[in-house]
Amino acid sequence: MKSEPVLSLILPCRNQGEYIGTLLPRYMPPLERAGLPFELIVVPNGCTDDTVAVVSRLAQQDERIRMVKLADGGWGRAVRAGLRLAWGSILSYTNSARTDPRLFPAFVERFLRNRDSLVKACREARQAPLRELGSALYNLEARLCFGLRCRDVNGTPKIFSRAFYESLSLTSVGDLFDLELIATASRAGVPVIEMPVHGFSRHGGKSSTTLSSAWKMYAGALRLSLQQLGIGRRKP
């Protein structure tokens, strides 16, 4: 008799002490409705506020919440640290500041019907025109450089099997993690299924994306494409 699959959701966070204490409990009812045993792995990274203390307190109150603390920041570093700690056969991660927890049952249901796929969000109707333009340029670059068909490389939640993730050798520690994941899935012939998600306001705090960080992502995407062609030195 096969054991029931476990869902591991990775939630990186940085300096979100002002709202993480009310946000994490909001994940529990939707994850329960998904119908699988689950764990919520919270990854404070490079925090200088009370995020770690708040998450630690909640983890003591609910054994389904686990925490791994990182001294250094980095989106990819945080996601990978959470995935290393995960117990589940179904893995997921999302942006803690910009995700509506109520989304998860639909994503889990879609994945369970397509277990050989990577299921992800495709953000639509975002409210900041400049960010929308920047995202469109980045996704255009991803299509041109990697031949990707997905419309929103960085859209989260993302959900996939442990077997798929363990077959990869991802190295990105920063914002290129999502692109490396999707590009690797595409090369391996893993279907990428996008589910539309309409605009959702941040829970709190401010975006860390700046013009400078956007340019770094554009340059990094080009460098990653050259590396995958065997040109140039590999950098995360």
Image (spheres, rainbow, N blue to C red):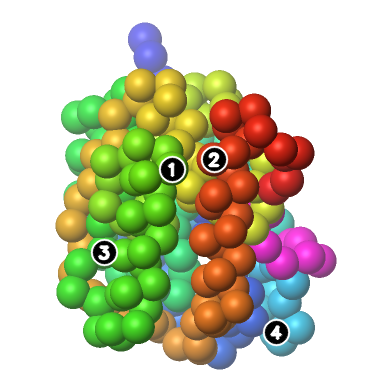
Of residues 25 and 44, the one drawn nearer to the viewer in this rendering: 44
Q: CA distance from mark 4 to mark 3?
A: 30 Å
Question: Could you tell which of marks 4 and 3 lies nearer the N-terminus?
Answer: 4
Q: Are marks 2 and 1 in contact (CB under 8 Å)?
A: yes
Q: Do labels 3 and 2 touch, CB within 8 Å?
A: no
Q: Residue at x 71, y 38 (%)?
A: 232
Q: Residue furthest right?
A: 71
Q: Earlier in the sequence, mark 4 or mark 1?
A: 4
In three-dimensional space, the C-alpha distance between marks 3 and 2, rounded to whole angstroms, equals: 24 Å
Query: Which numbered dot is residue 225?
Result: 2
Q: Which mark is residue 145?
A: 1
Q: Earlier in the sequence, mark 3 or mark 2?
A: 3
Q: Are marks 1 and 3 in contact (CB under 8 Å)?
A: no
Q: Nearer the viewer, residue 216 or 161?
A: 216
Q: Residues within 10 Å of mark 3 (few under 14, many from 20)?
A: many
Give the residue type at disc 3: Arg
Q: Main secondary structure of the magenta part?
A: loop
Camera sees residue 29 = no
State which tag comes first along the sequence, 1 or 3.
3
* Residue to which mark 3 is pinned: 123
Q: Which mark is residue 50?
A: 4
- Residue type, label 4: Asp
What span is in magenta?
69-77
User: Dot 2: few (<14), some (14–19), or many (≥20) neighbours within 10 Å?
Assistant: some
Above-or-below relation of 26 to 84: below
* Pair 4/3: label in front: 3
